[in-house]
Image (tube, coloured by chain):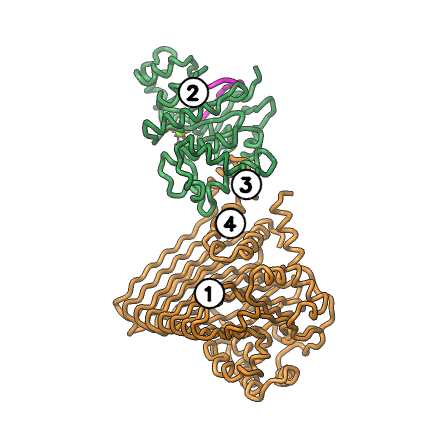
Amino acid sequence: MSTLLEIRDLTVGVGEKIILRGLDLTINAGETHVLMGQNGTGKSTLASAIMGNPAYTVRSGSILFEGEDITNETADKRARRGLFLSFQNPEEVPGITLENFMRTAKSAVTGEKPRVMQFRKDMNAAMDKLNMPQGYASRELNVGFSGGEKKKAEILQLLLLNPKLAILDEADSGLDVDAIRIVSDGVRRYRNEGNALLIITHNAKLVEELTVDYVHVLDQKKISLTGSAELITRITEGGFAGLGDNKADKGGASASREAQ
Amino acid sequence: MSDTEKTAGDFREVYDRRGTMEPDFKVTSGLTPEIIRTISDEKGDPDWMREFRLKSLELYNTIPVPDWGPSLDGLNMDNIVTYVRPKSGMEHSWDDVPTEIKDTFESLGIPEAERAGLAGVGAQYDSEVVYHSVRKEVAESGVVYTDMDSALKGEHSEMVREHFMKLLPPTEHKFMALHGAVWSGGSFVYVPPNVSVEIPLQSYFRFNAAGAGQFEHTLIILDKGATLHFIEGCSAPKYNVANLHAGCVELFVGEGARLRYSTIENWSKNMYNLNSKRATVAKDGAVEWVSGSFGSHTSYLYPMSILRGEGARMEYTGITFAGAGQELDTGAQVIHAAPRTTSSITGKSLSKDGGRSTFRSSVVVNRGAYGCKTSVVCDSLMLDNKSRSDTVPVIDVRNDDVDIGYEAKIGRISEQAIYYLMSRGISEGDAKAMIVNGFAEPISKELPLEYAVEMNNLITLEMSGKR
Ligand SMILES: Nc1ncnc2c1ncn2[C@@H]1O[C@H](COP(=O)(O)OP(=O)(O)OP(=O)(O)O)[C@@H](O)[C@H]1O
Ligand SMILES: [Mg+2]
């Protein structure tokens, strides 16, 4: 099995503050990983570090993609290698239509200009599947989109860009029940033997229809626990406190977080 | 090198191409009554114009340099040649225009645009208009579109005399006095009552000479119920000496008439652009300004609309981009001189690499002008920490039945937005250019397609730092 992502002993900070310390994670092609953890434990930070958000600094450790060290690469190069992040809070960018943006992105990641008519056809097909009205293509990128619409637009990009590794950061938050099913269908359609998923979620719904290989819990700045799919049910039913011995004492953990 | 950068480079080459043909005639540099008389002789002015020029020069010598805007210290009138006549007549066919000049306009895409969809074209090279033409069917509808010199002497001479520098008199400011003294070239347009010109007219000003000035005069008169879209374009190659542009645009919009005036000013970075534009709008008439200000070393540019008749309207949509070493001071002014007049000003400014852009808006509502509506929206985007954008609003309302809106936003380009676009494979440079083009979109969408494309190219050129 080929390794897509390998994170070794990663320490990440924002300004003076350390958010992740000594984190390890390996994702192979054909796998679906779920990352859970309490609010503010650093899940989005990890996604940002993997994608190359310049606001987050890798203090030590390394990130490898398909065996190559990408720790110091800019986000655009990582995207061209086949990394994708569906953002928890997608940016609004006025004056650029969703369609134009996606066509530019497509040509950037593939290195060739897509045919206008063919691209529009593909896009319309993907939008239909996500139950997005086609008028959205000519709307300004995320501007005035509702929370759920922004999430769907992210999944639309996932389907059109077809990356090797997709990180979905709370792709389900803010979605109604029907929309979660639609997004979940979309994600399932994307997954194949050659690619992989890292799904950050607080909710079992999105991953119900997917075959989950690993579930990780982020706590105390690193992955504190890794298990199989049943871990999701344990967490959603019993909370993080119910994870028992495998887990560090909660009070101590948050106290030390606050002390930072 | 990406596609967009290539386009930017190509564009720069076109704008920067220097003509090498010796001028047919030019005056010595500086400003003296002698020089003014020479210009008048060379142009064969009627007597009143000769007097007008000399009086304007006297005014010029008494009016001080403005002390409230960007510095004009680098501009020394003693070094400026105010009249440069190219070796070309005023032709009606491109075939008669000398090859080198024709090639310049070809590379700027003017004849092509003319064939593709313009009702008429005027092309000026340095101080004189070298080409003017108007479609037959447009001329047959009674529309007059000629160079100013022909208008001044031809059958419309009375109309010219009645309107010339009446909206913007030489007393207005020092550089209008200068304009009155040395003006040359420009276009004259008259649209008869209820005639609607369906496709635009365009005048293009190419300023080739180094150490010189260009002072074209544009006079547009729309009679009752007429409509017109007029486009003005300009460019110049870059030199190491200061050049001066002090054009004057006067727009007379009749009752129920509608004029759209679109400009992309694209000057080289050695240019002092001290341009003045003003419109007067009669009852139920409308003037719409669409303006893109690029290049120049220093610009002063604040088109004014005087809403003189009840129900008159004005709309201004403009963008200014100041890069390294540039100080662009632009804005829009409106005077509500009649009841129920409306105005809407949208000004966008960009600054980069230490450039400075200021947007001044001025709204005056006169005492008797009841039931007016005005809205001003200014939006500034700074592309780095070294650059500066300011907005300076002035609102002077002299009655209490007015609906006023004012909104100003100043911000830096969002790092998170750049990262968002980059996370989709788009390079940092392209991501910034996309964001900036998006910022400019409200203006480019008001422009005809080719001009919107040109504006996007100018933005890309500015973003690449190659200007
Ligand atoms: N740019 C930043 N500046 C300052 N602090 C930050 C920044 N980004 C994240 N943090 C802090 O780092 C910690 C981790 O944040 P992160 O967004 O990664 O959490 P999360 O696990 O994704 O939480 P949630 O489940 O609420 O989305 C939080 O305490 C947050 O306040
Ligand atoms: Mg998060």
Q: Is residue A31 magenta?
A: yes
As drawn, the label of residue B199 is none
Q: Whereabouts is ligand 1, in terms of quadrant?
A: top left
Query: Chain for mark 4?
Result: B
Q: Amino acid at mark 3?
A: Val
Between the residue at mark 3 and the residue at mark 1, the CA separation in whole angstroms equals 33 Å
Residue nearer the viewer, A157 or A25: A157
Residue marked by disc 3? A116
The magenta region covers A20-35
Residue marked by disc 2? A34
Residue nearer the viewer, B368 or B161: B161
Display colour for chain A: green
Between the residue at mark 4 and the residue at mark 1, the CA separation in whole angstroms equals 23 Å
Residue nearer the viewer, B359 or B84: B84
Tell me the quadrant of the picture where the C terminus of chain B can be found: bottom right
Residue marked by disc 4? B437
Residue A259 in sight from this viewpoint: no
* Snapshot quadrant of residue B155: bottom right
Which circle, 3 or 4, is nearer the viewer?
3
Q: Secondary structure at mark 2?
A: strand
Q: Is residue A43 left or right of residue B370?
A: right
Q: Position of residue B74 (x, y in %)?
A: 59, 67
The reply to whether dot 3 and dot 4 touch (C-beta < 8 Å) is no
Q: Amino acid at mark 4?
A: Asn
Which circle, 4 or 1, is nearer the viewer?
1
Q: Is residue B41 left or right of residue B52?
A: right
